Structure formats: C-alpha cells, structure tokens
C-alpha cells in the first residue's frame, strides 16, 4: 500500500475541511477500507480518522414521530446488543448479528457499514476488469463468476451487490441518514442513499465527497413483534449473503395491517419490495398469502449464468422470512 | 455404569494432554516466521497477471528507487544456482516434467507466478515497492479448466498409477442391477492458518540457517543443499511448530529456494512470508478431478463388476499423481474390477497432496456410488457393504494384518442411531427441516518407514528423545511422549521429545499417516534399548525400574544414550495393512432454501492401538471437519477466461466455522496391529477425512432424495 497521511481531528468542521481535498478518505473502524488499501483498490493520500468525534450515542428522540438516533460511530456490536434496539428494532439487531464475525462487529461502525464496498471479486482484483474500480475497463462479472451477483436493478456496466446486512434492515425500517458537509446538515431517505449502478457504477451512494455521516435515524414502528431477518449463505456464520430478507409486519387479529420488505444479496443496494408490501396489506398472515406473493416479488428480475438459482432462492427466502415474522414457521 | 463402559468416553478422558498445548495457547510456541534475526531484510513478490506467455519487458526502476529497497530480483539479474545447472537448459525440465524454477527465464506458466522479488528493509516497504513493478507480456493462449483439456489426458508414468484389471471389469454391464455415474471434486486449497514462511540466514559463504514452514526438515535440508551445492550439514533447517499444513508443506517450493538465494545476494538474513492469495497459486492444491464409477450387482447385492476411472489435473510442467482410484481395487470383494487413472495438464501451478489426498477424492465417488447402488437395490447401505466385505485383500490375495471394519460399522451405527434412518429418502421431517442419515468409509495404507531416534537418560532423570521429525499440529510430540512413557516405564512428565531440527537423527517427512508408526517404533525401540543398556550397566538382577539418577551418579556418568534406527520387518510384506474409518452423519436440509446443517457426526476409526487418546481424538475431529468442508463448501474458483482465482482469500474460500460443526463423537476400535509396528498402532491422519464427504452427500440424499455428485454441495444445488 502506498504511503499516506493520517490525521485525527476532534471537530466535525475539521473533518469536513479535510474532506474538501481530493484523495482524502474517512476511516472509522477500518475493517473495510484498510483491506481495500492493501489490495490496491483504494489508495487515498490522506486518512481522516473520525473516532474522536462524539458520534457513538444511541438515543431515543421525542418529536412528531418518535425516532431512534444511532451515531455513525456506534459499533455494530454495540447497536446489536443495545437493550432499546433489541426491544424496539429487533430486526436491526438480528441483521447486525448476521453480519461478519464478533471480532469484526466490535470494530465496524454504523457509518462504515453503510459505506462498505461491494465484495465482487473483480472489484477486489486490480488485475481484472471492473467498471466500479476502474470506469470503462468493463465488467468482469457479467460473463464470469457471478454466483453472488445482482438480479434486480443492475446495468450492463455493473452487476455487483451491496454486501451489508445492517443496511437491509435499515431499508426495511425506512431509516434516514443524517449527513453533514460544507453546505451544512441534510437528511437522506434510506432508499435514496445507495444508488443503482446505471452508467456510473463507481458511485455507490449519494453522499457528497465533502460529507460525513453523523447519524442514522429510525422512526419507531409497530413491527417489533413480527419482524425477522433471514440470511441464506454458504456456511452457518461468517459468510456474505447469497440472499437475505428483512421482513417487518404489523399484524392485528391475524391480518396484515402494514408490511416492510427489503432484501440483500440481490441488488446494488438494499432492495425494497413496495408492490409486495402493498399486496400484503389487509391479507391474512398465512402461509397461503405469503406463497402467493413470490411471483409478484420477482417481477423484473434478471439472472446470469451462475446466479440463476437466485430466481428461486429469492422468493423462497422471502416466504420463509415472512412465515418466521408471522410466527407460523 | 453404562457410561463408564463407553469405549469412546474412556478413550478421550484418558491419556496425556498435548505436551506443547500450553505453549500454543499462551503464544509462546514459535513459528517459522517468528525467528526474527538482527538486521533482517524482507522479501515480497510481484506476480504475473497473465496465465501463459513470456515477459517482454519488466520495469523495476521505480521499485529500485523506492525507500528501503535493497534489491529487485528478476530473471534478468538472478544468479544461476549451481544445483540448477544440470548441464541442460534449466528452462526445459526433463521429460515427465520438473518443478518450477523462479527467475531462470522469461516464461510465465501460470497466473500469479512470481516475476520479481523485492527485498527491502521492511515488509511494508517491500510490499509497496513490489506494487511499482510493471511487466509487459507476450500472452499465449491457455487453458486452466481441466474439463476443457480432457483430450490431453494421459496415463502417467509409474507403477502405482497403471491401469488395473482383475477378472473382466466389463462384467458389470451384464449384471442384474447396473449403476453408473460421474463425480466431480473441484480444486480445494489447503489453507492452513499459518502462511508459508521462511527465514534464511547465511552464516558463512557456504553455510545457511533456515527457519521454514515444512513438513520435513530433512527434505528441506536436502532440497536447499542440492540447489546451492552445499554439504548437507551446512544447511540447518529448524521447524519447531507448524500452524497446519495438510500437505502444502510436503515439498520445498520454488519461493523457498528464491528466498535463500536472495538472502545470499543481499548478505542479510531475509524473511519471506507468502500472502494468503499466494497460498492458492504457489503451494499446491487438491486437483480438480473427474471420476466415473460403473458397478454391477446381483439382485441380492453381490458385486459382480466395478470400474473406477479418474482424471485429475496436473500442471503443464510437472506430473502430479495420487491414489485416487486405488481404494476401489480392494475395498470390496468383487471378482471383476478395473481402475484407470489419468492426468490432464492445465496452465496452473502443480497440485499437491491435500489431506486424505487422492483417496479422499476417490472415496467420495466410490462411497457415493455404493450408496446409490444400495438405494437402487432397496437395501440398507451397511448391509450392502457387509455382503461384499473383503476378508482377505482382493487385490493381492494377502491376509489383512488387522481389519475391524465390520466392528466399526456396528459401533458407529449404534452410536448415531442408524435405525432412525428413513429407508425412503425425503420422508423424515423435523421442525420444517428434512432429516437424513448417511455413512461413508475411508481406508488408507497403514504405512511404516524408517526412522532414527536418540534416547538419552540425563543426569536429572529426564529422558530426552531426539529425531528430525516435524509436528504439523497433529500431536506427534505428545504421541511420542506417550509411547516412550509406556515403553520406558516412566511418567510422561519426565520425558522430553525434541523435534524439528535437521541436525537431529533422521526421520521422514510428516505425511501419509505414517509418523506414529514410523517414529513411534524408533522411539519404542530406542527406549527398550536404553533400558537394556541400563540393565547391563547395573548387572544382572537389577530392578526393572532402577533409580536412573542414582545409577548415573554411582557410575560417574553424565548421561547414558542410545541411537536406534527402526525399520519395518520383512514379515509385514506378507500382509495387507490398512487403517479404516467409518463416518456417520445426520443432516438437516431446509426444503425451501437448500441450506444444509450437519447435526450429528460419529466417526469410527480402526487405526490399531491408540497411542495418545486425546490427540487422536483431535486428529479425527479435525479430519471430520475437513471432510465437512470438502462436502459442503470448499472450492477454489478460477475464472478460466483469465486463469485467475476469484476467491483467493478466506472470505471467498469457505472452510467450516464453529457454527457449522456439531458435537463430533469419535470412537476407536482400539485393537493393536503388531504386524505394522511393535506398539500396534496404525495411522489415522488421512482416514479422519477420507469418506466423510460421501457420508454427507449420502445423508443429504437420504434427507431430500437429491443426489449431488459435484462437490461442494452448496444451497443452490439443493433448492426446491
Ligand atoms: C471478512 C469479513 C466479513 C464480513 N462479513 C460481513 C457480513 O456478512 N455482512 C456485513 O454486513 N458486513 C460484513 N463485513 C463488512 C463489515 O461490516 C464492514 O467492514 C464494516 O461495517 C465497515 O465499518 P468500518 O467502521 O470498519 O468502516 P471503514 O473500513 O473504516 O470504512 C469503510 C468506508 O466507509 C467510509 N466511512 C466510514 N465512516 C464514515 C462516516 N461516518 N461518514 C462517511 N463515510 C464513512 C470510509 O471512508 C470507507 O470508505 C465483513 C467484513 C470482513 C472483513
């Protein structure tokens, strides 16, 4: 890895100032960035360590809507085990605990988790083509090893998936990302935070270069009783998802009042299933109901040589997760 | 009462604990990369990004100018090694191939082959400088996919790999019940925790000390002495601990020779540690192997014909062979048997033995096929095996020195609850998961070679045993201590076993499940000889357990020692000697997602007398876990368009984690085989893994009715 500068400012403003210089990158837990630097995939001139910023709190905020604010530097393990999160946002806790390993979760931060980059092997190997790493070089995965790749929202330029588990739960829970930059503070709806690859797969998300994530805000909801995160992977733990489903249901008297569904391992961003959510409203929370929505869920899906199995695994996982959430599995 | 009689329970609550366990868990055990020397230099490779061709130009200027760089070595400036000059063009190895030699010419034979080595004053600086090296290549067309190179498959040279025929193998075609299928084992990579590492320190112009990750200090000593044309004793190799190897440190790889050469060039001690990525393409792997099994049987399950064919991958420059089909010749009593073994070259590095080696690959096919035949016959797979039980070796007609496979079937079936196995696949469900049982057996030659051990009774009463064996983690030191304790009749706390040093009396390389029998025999014999020497010293009528400290003192001796070489007897040649295992598993498969969980494992070993129950149990557990990895997740994936691995790290190459592994019950038949060696032990390192992948595949079939013949059995292959 090439030589770089390293600073550890104590104020948000100095972080933002530092970020205005090209070649500067934030480092939080370092569990993804350092890896990428070692592989020569990212080679910043300067690292801004934000660990001295007071962004570790997890707090309940009263307002028009009650929300829970999670600091960008809160550790994945800290959030997963937090009593309030476990009680009110169990889906988030489950998703976090399905990710990586205990050691990594002790290093990984919420901000870093959102910003982690794809695990596509072509992105990681600088000897191979990848439009995300090296725009215009081509997509190695398109006709290559694409077993782990996207079936929704991809482009010919990039079929990589976003690897985060946490983000899938946050997408389902309609979170908001609070960011601060040169122009001040703004709030990005979770669905608008990560991007689809389109013609610019080099851009993972809509965060501006001079911006820093400060908090993730999750509105309180009625899903705590009936939510479930199901991750299907090649081994029991410590593996990225083949596909995963974050499912949250509001069930009253056996009927679904409201539903939120997002899936991981299927797209360049956590993939929301708005049509399915709508279709579930008012239906009985039953195996029959769930098994009927598979087809609707898969509209627009497109697979490649090695990930065709996801066309079946995705609805199967979704149905399983729904059954678990409704406690009929 | 019942619990106390459980042989399994007794087996691992008795016996001594790992003699180096404390050193390992406290971090005090020193591995090869940890012998830091003063003024040490660090080497890092720059590797080819093409698969095949020649280097047109290689620009090392930026690297040479980078801070801390001492030397950049390429084929253009590497000195010729005296031992490499065989009078022939070193770039053209002899017919049948030869090992790769680094930096001898501009050819690239596989992707990731080192094209330059940077030596710098720190690892980080060497790494950075290596990233600045720019090579341009004249690329040639290549093939890394063995399935596309089958037209180049050939019969290798060598007796053990010749076609085998007994009776008329084609007889299977005329059978009442016929079965034929193909099985695939992909590339698997050893991936021990410890990366390959070597430290070389030239202490004189013609003398070098080496700390290397190796399974054989003597073989590494030989290889280095040969390459540099040095007297053997001028090469000192030390390997006190090995953090797993599974076969990938069985030979001296070209990077090791390069490191020794570089140390000489920069005149400093030098350390080279390979990256994880280089574990995939520089130190061997289990070759991608295609197999076909054809069997015929009578309606009541007597085998009438069996053919086992295999084609394994090798490299373009070297011929690697293993015993993939051999088990089919003698595992079952069958009058008509044929085996055919071929290799097909690919533009990859050379494969090497990986735990269980070819036998593990072969057992996946044979033991799956037997299960398939049993299903076709509507017969219990154990019953089918019993109906074809070989009482004498069908390959050569010799008696087995010991064979307790029948007992092993019984013990394992009992323990796992085989009676709960549904006779109809896909019919047992529990909490929404499909449940199935499967079994598979393994077999491996109970080998014994020659070893020399020096046994010394020291003035303080400690018995010191010394030999140049290594312990790759299997517990050799512990087993040898246990054997000595029994043979000499003193407690293990008073015994010290010293290994991992090429200046000690010779022992073979650790591999092929032969070390306990080989070195153990020498330890045993040396202990008896030393006891005898004491008896002579004391004179007739001495106590069986004299006070050694006092005897030495009385006789004015600082110590008493013997050096004994033990070799197998010619008597052993009259027998066929094998170790056997039977693995039983219970699996649960989720019908919708295809996720498999192994929920119970019982592994039974017929490996003679158990010399060291605790480490023996660990051996079996480790092998069983390796077998579960082989069955469910391990696969080195190459993108054949580029010839590069696309999962060359531990996030992409999956081995089991704790959550994948249930409680593993180990059972030892624990009956001695005194033909093999005087302690009655037979090896167990390989059988611990051999047969496990078939057991899992068979259990999955029993659970789901789906037969997967291509490993690994990932969820996508089992989804509804
Ligand atoms: C072996 C392995 C297995 C893993 N398995 C999983 C898994 O199964 N599921 C899963 O979800 N994840 C998995 N991970 C990924 C892990 O979750 C991420 O590495 C981690 O969340 C990143 O957090 P960090 O704080 O270490 O980020 P860093 O590495 O410090 O940063 C990552 C990126 O985020 C940016 N960044 C960090 N904080 C901020 C901020 N506040 N504002 C703006 N930008 C910021 C950095 O500039 C950098 O680009 C795995 C990782 C490894 C190494």
Image (spheres, rainbow, N blue to C red):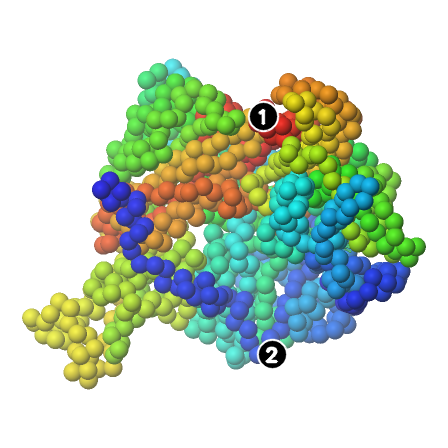
Q: Which residue is mark 1?
A: A328
From what the image shows, is residue B435 above or below residue B238? above
Q: Residue at x 25, y 33 (%)?
A: B391
What chain does mark 2 sit on?
B
Q: Is residue B12 left or right of residue A102?
A: left
Question: In the rendered structure, are the residues bearing label 2 and label 1 in contact, judged by CB atoms less than 8 Å apart?
Answer: no
| Residue B581 figure quarter | top left
Q: Position of residue B637 (x, y in %)?
A: 62, 42
Q: Position of residue A247 (x, y in %)?
A: 68, 33
Q: Which residue is mark 2?
A: B39
| Residue B89 figure quarter | bottom right
From what the image shows, is residue A200 above or below residue B168? below
Q: Residues within 10 Å of mark 2 (few under 14, many from 20)?
A: few
Q: Residue at x 72, y 57 (%)?
A: A56
Q: Is residue B62 left or right of residue A95?
A: right
From what the image shows, is residue B32 above or below residue B664? below
Specify whether residue B276 is in view.
yes
In this rendered view, identify the residue nearer to me: A205 or B543: A205
């Amino acid at each position: 890895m090439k030589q770089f500068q390293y600073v550890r400012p104590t104020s948000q403003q100095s972080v933002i100032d530092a970020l205005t210089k090209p070649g500067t990158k934030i480092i939080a837990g370092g569990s993804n960035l350092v890896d990428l630097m070692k592989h020569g995939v990212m080679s910043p001139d300067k690292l801004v360590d934000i660990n001295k910023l007071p962004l570790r709190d997890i707090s309940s905020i009263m307002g028009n809507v009650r929300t829970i604010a999670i600091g960008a530097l809160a550790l994945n393990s800290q959030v997963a085990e937090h009593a309030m999160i476990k009680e009110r946002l169990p889906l988030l806790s489950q998703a976090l605990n399905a990710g990586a390993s205990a050691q990594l979760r002790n290093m990984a931060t919420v901000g870093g988790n959102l910003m982690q980059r794809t695990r596509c092997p072509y992105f990681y190997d600088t000897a191979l083509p990848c439009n995300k790493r090296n725009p215009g070089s081509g997509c190695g995965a398109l006709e290559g090893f694409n077993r782990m790749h996207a079936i929704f929202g991809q482009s010919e330029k990039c079929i990589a998936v976003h690897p985060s588990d946490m983000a899938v739960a946050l997408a389902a829970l309609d979170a908001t990302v609070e960011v601060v930059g040169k122009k001040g503070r703004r709030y990005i709806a979770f669905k608008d935070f990560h991007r689809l690859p389109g013609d610019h797969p080099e851009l993972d998300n809509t965060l501006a270069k001079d911006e820093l994530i400060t908090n993730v805000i999750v509105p309180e909801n009625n899903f705590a009783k009936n939510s479930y995160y199901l991750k299907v992977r090649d081994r029991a733990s410590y593996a990225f998802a083949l596909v995963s489903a974050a499912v949250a249901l509001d069930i009253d008297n056996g009927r679904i009042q409201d539903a939120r569904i997002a899936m991981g391992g299927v797209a360049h961003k956590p993939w929301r299933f708005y049509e399915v959510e709508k279709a579930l409203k008012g239906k009985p929370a039953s195996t029959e109901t769930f098994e009927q929505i598979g087809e609707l869920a898969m509209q627009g899906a497109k697979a490649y040589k090695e990930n065709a199995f996801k066309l079946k695994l995705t609805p199967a996982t979704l149905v399983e997760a729904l059954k678990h959430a409704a406690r009929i599995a | 009462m019942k619990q106390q009689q459980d042989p399994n329970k007794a087996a691992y609550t008795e016996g001594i604990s790992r003699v180096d366990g404390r050193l390992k868990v406290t971090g005090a055990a020193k591995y090869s990369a940890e012998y830091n020397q003063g003024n040490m230099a660090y080497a890092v490779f720059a590797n080819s990004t093409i698969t095949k061709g020649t280097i047109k130009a290689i620009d090392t200027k930026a690297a040479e100018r980078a801070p801390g760089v001492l030397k950049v070595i390429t084929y253009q400036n590497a000195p010729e090694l005296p031992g490499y000059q065989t009078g022939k063009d070193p770039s053209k190895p002899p017919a049948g191939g030869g090992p790769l030699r680094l930096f001898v010419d501009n050819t690239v034979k596989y992707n990731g082959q080192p094209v330059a080595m940077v030596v710098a004053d720190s690892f980080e600086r060497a790494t950075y400088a290596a990233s600045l090296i720019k090579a341009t290549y004249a690329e040639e067309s290549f093939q890394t996919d063995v399935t596309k190179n089958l037209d180049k498959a050939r019969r290798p040279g060598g007796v053990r790999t010749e076609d085998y025929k007994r009776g008329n193998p084609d007889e299977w075609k005329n059978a009442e019940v016929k079965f034929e299928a193909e099985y695939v084992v992909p590339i698997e990579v050893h991936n021990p925790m410890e990366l390959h590492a070597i430290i070389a320190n030239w202490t004189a112009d013609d003398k070098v000390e080496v700390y290397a990750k190796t399974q054989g200090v003597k073989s590494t000593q030989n290889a280095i002495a040969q390459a540099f044309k040095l007297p053997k004793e001028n090469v000192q190799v030390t390997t006190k601990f090995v953090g797993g190897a599974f076969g990938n440190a069985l030979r001296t790889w070209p990077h090791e020779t390069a490191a020794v050469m570089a140390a000489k060039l920069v005149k400093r001690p030098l350390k080279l540690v390979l990256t994880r990525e280089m574990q995939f393409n520089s130190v061997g792997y289990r070759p991608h192997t295609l197999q076909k099994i054809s069997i015929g049987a009578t309606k009541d399950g007597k085998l009438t014909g069996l053919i086992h064919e295999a084609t394994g991958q090798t490299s373009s420059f070297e011929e690697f062979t293993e015993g993939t089909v051999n088990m089919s010749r003698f595992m079952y009593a069958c009058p008509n048997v044929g085996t055919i073994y071929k290799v097909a070259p690919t533009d990859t590095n050379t494969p090497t033995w990986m735990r269980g080696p070819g036998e593990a690959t072969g057992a996946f096919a044979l033991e799956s096929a037997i299960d398939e035949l049993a299903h076709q016959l509507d017969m219990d797979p154990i019953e089918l095996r019993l109906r074809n039980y070989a009482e004498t070796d069908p390959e050569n007609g010799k008696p087995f020195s010991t064979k307790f496979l029948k007992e092993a079937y019984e013990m394992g079936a009992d323990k796992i609850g085989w009676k709960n196995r549904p006779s109809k696949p896909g019919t047992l469900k529990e909490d929404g998961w499909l449940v199935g049982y499967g079994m598979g057996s393994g077999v491996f030659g109970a080998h014994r070679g020659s070893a020399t051990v020096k046994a010394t009774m020291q003035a303080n009463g400690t018995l010191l045993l010394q030999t140049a064996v290594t312990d790759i983690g299997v517990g050799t030191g512990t087993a040898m201590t246990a054997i000595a304790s029994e043979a000499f009749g003193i407690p293990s706390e008073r015994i010290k076993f010293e290994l991992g040093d090429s200046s000690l009396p010779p022992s073979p390389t650790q591999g092929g499940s032969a070390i306990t029998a080989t070195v153990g025999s020498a330890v045993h014999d040396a202990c008896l000889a030393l006891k005898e020497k004491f008896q002579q010293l004391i004179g007739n009528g001495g106590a069986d357990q004299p006070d050694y400290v006092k005897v030495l003192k009385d006789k004015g001796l600082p110590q008493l020692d013997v050096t004994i070489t033990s070799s197998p007897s010619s008597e052993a040649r009259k027998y066929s000697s094998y170790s056997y295992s039977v693995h039983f598993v219970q699996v649960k498969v989720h019908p919708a997602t295809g996720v498999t969980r192994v929920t119970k494992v019982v592994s039974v070993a017929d490996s003679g007398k158990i010399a060291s129950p605790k480490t023996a149990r660990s051996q079996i557990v480790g092998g069983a876990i390796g077998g579960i990895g082989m069955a469910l997740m391990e696969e080195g994936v190459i993108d054949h368009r580029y010839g590069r691995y696309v999962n060359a790290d531990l996030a992409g190459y999956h081995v089991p984690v704790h959550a994948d592994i249930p409680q593993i019950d180990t059972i030892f038949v624990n009956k001695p085989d005194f033909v093999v060696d005087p302690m009655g032990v037979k090896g167990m390192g390989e059988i611990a893994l051999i047969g496990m992948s078939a057991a899992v595949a068979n259990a999955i079939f029993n659970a789901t009715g789906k037969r997967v013949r291509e490993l690994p059995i990932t969820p996508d292959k089992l989804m509804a």
